Image (spheres, rainbow, N blue to C red):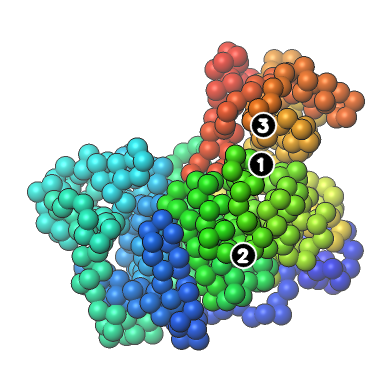
Amino acid sequence: MSAELSSASPETPTLSRSYARGSTDVPLIEQTLGGFFDAIAAHQPGHEALVSVHQGRRYSYRELQREANRLASALLGLGLQPGERVGIWSHNNAEWLLLQLATAKVGLILVNINPAYRTAEVEYALNKVNCKALVSMASFKTSDYLGMLRELAPEWAHGQAGLLESSALPHVQTVIWIDEAGQGEEQPGLMRFSSLLASGDPDDARLAAIAVTLQASDPINIQFTSGTTGFPKGATLTHRNILNNGYFIGEAMKLTPADRLCIPVPLYHCFGMVLGNLACLTHGATIVYPNDGFDALSVLQTVQAEKCTGLHGVPTMFIAELDHTRFKEFDLSTLRTGIMAGSPCPTEVMKRVVEQMHLSQITIAYGMTETSPVSCQSSIDTPLDKRVSTVGLVQPHLEIKIIDPESGDIVATGVSGELCTRGYSVMHGYWDDAPRTQEAIDADGWMHTGDLATMDSEGYVNIVGRIKDMVIRGGENIYPREIEEFLYRHPKVQDVQVVGLPDKRYGEELCAWIVIKPGQTLSEDEVRDFCKGKIAHYKVPRYIRFVSGFPMTVTGKIQKFKIRDEMKNQLGLEEDKTA
């Protein structure tokens, strides 16, 4: 058992089974988020904490602390009590971070609402967790957030701020809209963020009185997971969950106060909120928001202007930056680290990021919302071949194992199976949903991810796909990720996604959606010729389509089920109901 339970590190004895446990040299943080942040602010009050480029705002740690305290006081002034839920429906801005800190300081639970949600989805989310208050953007591009809320609750037009009533949203009493220092028309029944903030007292004695009653194990955050079927589930996370995860993520990147991290990924998702905000705040680094939503040009401009040392993104973001027509104009030489995550990271894209963006110490992170989110991560000194081909080693204080989905037995190294995680990062549970919590977390505390993975003899993990994404063609198990990695090598291919489609003869056939590099042309025959003799014939996609992009979530996760559905409709294919 000693080798099986050893820490995953370069000194690890050669593993024969797919089980690894992270180091425990550095103890877990047992403080609340508010307490830990206050200690950092006291240590370096004048250091720059936040730059919100698109808003033209800068905050030192002392200023951020005072404004967060002022907002926490104002929230208490609304009559909110510890344990109650406050929603945030917004893209990236300073108000988002202030609310993240303020709610944590007074024991309120922040509910992250996807900015892509529309009326039915936001109604479901707010009612599922009984939100008492909601902070919302007024609008963004074609999304009219306040208009959607008024459609749901027309009664609010005649309501009183703080005493709202409606039949569709019976729990919501206060709606605060994010304004720019008093600009914009008044909104009947709704409250301005600037007015709410002005009503608070940064020296409110209630803050300290509440702080001593809070525990690290208290829920602090609810994030809705965007399942491909059924209603979203509210993954409930504690101070201990996300504070420690943010800390150890920052450790893998070797963050220090000298670092300035550009965060173009959305804050409503763990990527922005934990891998971004909390990785920085736990290390005294500077948070930099280039824009409210992702825009490749503003990222490049911000990295240069703010001399950013780190950059986060999903693969599609890095591709958009690398292939931007003005990419070569910008000096990105200050960059060293960051995280690529959110969806499988193509090896060829990683190589370009390292070579062309100066991100020699970029890391790969793997996880899921239900595990706060990161379970595995490469570090800045992980050998490059491992960094571009794996998701690294298990994080400190966590255990991972890869099991046979049928028997539940731990598989041998090199054999694929379902990845499971156990430790401090596993969520508190799905909000008000014990049955689905028990489906996800077994009696021994293991979170079953639904991801297919392999582990090598050194403990490095490779994600090979989703259990549901695996294609079985004529009895052969095919992992779309493998085909995607191969097709990325074609010099004319910018991006590619592979899915399985129903087939009467073979059960399933492969379909590839390909985005061609700008200025190039590519034919189906060229793609097939490229595959011939290099990959097995049954792995060559039968269907090939050239597209301008993929259906995806706000966080950049590709929605493969939508690709599958569209192709089934195009081709008139039906699932084999007997299977």
Instruction: Kindly identify which residue carries mark 2.
Output: 309
Q: Between 11 and 47, which is closer to the camera in this rendering? A: 47
Instruction: Kindly identify which residue carries mark 1.
Output: 466
Q: For this view, does 291 lie left or right of residue 351?
A: left
- Disc 2 or disc 1, which is closer to the eye? 2
Q: Distance between the residues labelled 2 and 1?
A: 33 Å
Other-residue count near label 2 (Cα within 10 Å), few / some / many at <14 / 14–19 / ≥20: many
Look at 47% across and 72% down and name the residue there.
49
Q: For this view, does 497 lie left or right of residue 125?
A: right
Query: Percent from the top left, x then y, of residue 366?
Result: 65, 55
Query: Percent from the top left, x then y, of residue 310?
Result: 61, 62
Query: Does residue 424 appear in the picture of this structure?
Result: no
Counting residues from the start of the chain, the first of labels 2 and 1 encountered is: 2
**51 shown above or below 548:** below
Q: Distance between the residues labelled 2 and 3?
A: 28 Å
Q: Between 440 and 449, which is closer to the camera in this rendering? A: 449
Q: In which quarter of the image is residue 221?
A: bottom left
Look at 60% across and 52% down and name the residue there.
330
| Contact, mark 1 vs mark 3 (Cβ under 8 Å) | no
Query: Does residue 45 appear in the picture of this structure?
Result: yes
Quarter of the image with the C terminus is top right
Say what amino acid the circle numbered 1 marks. Arg
**The residue positioned farthest toward the front in the image shown:** 329
Query: Percent from the top left, x then y, of residue 532?
Result: 86, 23
Callout 1: SS: strand
